[in-house]
Amino acid sequence: MEKLNVPRDNRIKAQQRRASKKITQGIESKINLLHKLNVYKRLKEFLFFGLIYMSGFILAFTIDSIAAVIIGIILMGIAFNSLAIFIHEGLHGILAKNEKINHLISFLVGLPILISATAYQTTHNNHHYQLGRKLDYGTYKQHVKKSKWIWLAYVLQLTFGSFIYVIFIPFLGFFGETKKSRIVILIEYLIIISTATLVFSSMALDQILFYWFYPMLVLNILTNIRGLASHALGDVENIYLSSRTVRCSKLVEQVFLHENYHLEHHLFPRIPSYNLPKVHKLIWERLPEAIYAKSYLGFLMQMIKAGLKNNSGPLGVTHPKHK
């Protein structure tokens, strides 16, 4: 993956720098420490979700019970969901200290969910550095002006979002990259297609369904809810209101690898996800404003109410600093 050359006059990046500098005044050293990558924590995360997948596999394979099969599929889906978050970490260079190893791991975790790390990086860089602009496909108001089409986009994201993204990532990545990266994208997808063909051809249809496709449906649900809550009904012109922080239980937070702290992630994209709770504690009461939800279910309920009123303004605005 090539290093991104971000212009110094980039509006989003400049706004992020100003906000970060303002809210970290006096705690710069603490924030700097949180940027440090802990290899052992990463290994523990991989081991944890690997065990979750194996537990789900064993439940679905060995116990003759519908309940056991359903629980097994959910566990395997949770493990697949972690792959989507791990590849996201890799795009920010925080899976491994060595750049080449980081890319290799990013590719490997993307392989089971059919995503090229290089193609995904292009679209994700645009999301961070062109937030709310033409090249950002993580938000919608810049692409569709009418409120009804924005709400349709939200519904599509909630239902089929991750599948749509898997289909479009190759094209968005390929046509937005340099010649060198295009070659890498083609090679990565050639390996992905070849591996999938080899593995699936050696499996029975019911095995493909129970150990890959049904868990992918669970991934779709988890990813879509998390992704929608991250940016839907925000204000991309205001860095503080562009991404949402969602409060949730420790269990849900672990399942999402702390990506519920999405505002914190956009303010400090190079901080590993396992340190985002610490970032939240350090900066939350320094924020002049933010969009916030008490839970993912609470966010969805609030969103339904806003949809019924056709209200597409920022949802869940709070002022932590004044509280």
Image (cartoon, rainbow, N blue to C red):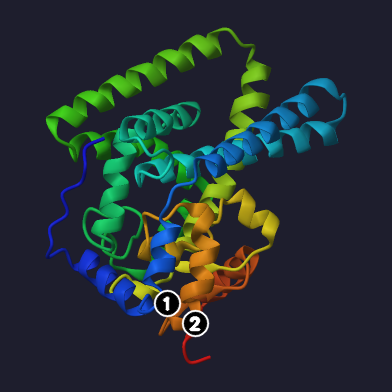
Crowd band around label 1 with a 10 angstrom C-alpha radius: few (<14), some (14–19), many (20+) = some
Upstream in sequence: badge 1 or badge 2: 2
Residue corresponding to mark 2: 285
Image point (23%, 64%), residue name: 13
- Give above or below for 184 relative to 129: above
- Of the 4 image quadrants, the one containing the N terminus is top left
Mark number for residue 227? none
Left/right of residue 108 with respect to residue 255 in the rendered view:
left
Q: How many marks?
A: 2
Question: Residue 153: percent from the left, percent from the top?
Answer: 41, 57
Disc 1 from disc 2: Cα separation: 20 Å
Q: In this image, 266 relative to 9: left or right? A: right
Q: Position of residue 276 (x, y in %)?
A: 50, 60
Amino acid of disc 2: Glu
Residue 227 versus residue 286 in the image, above or below:
above
Q: Residue furthest front?
A: 29
Where is residue 293 shown, x and y percent of the image?
Answer: 56, 72
Of the two numbered discs 1 and 2 in the rendering, the one whose residue sits closer to the viewer = 2
- Between 297 and 124, which is closer to the camera in this rendering? 124
Judge whether residue 134 can be spotted in this image: yes
Q: Is residue 271 left or right of residue 207?
A: left
The image's mark for residue 314 is 1
Pick the front one: 96 or 57: 96
Residue 149 visible, this orientation: no
Residue drawn at point x = 46 percent, y = 62 percent: 262
Q: Residue at x 38, y 39 (%)?
A: 97
Q: Quadrant of residue 20?
A: bottom left
* Circle 1: element type: loop
Residue flagged by tag 1: what amino acid is it?
Pro
Badge 2, how many Cα within 10 Å: few under 14, some, many 20+?
A: some
Residue 265 place in picture, x, y as percent: 42, 60
Near-viewer residue (163 or 37): 37
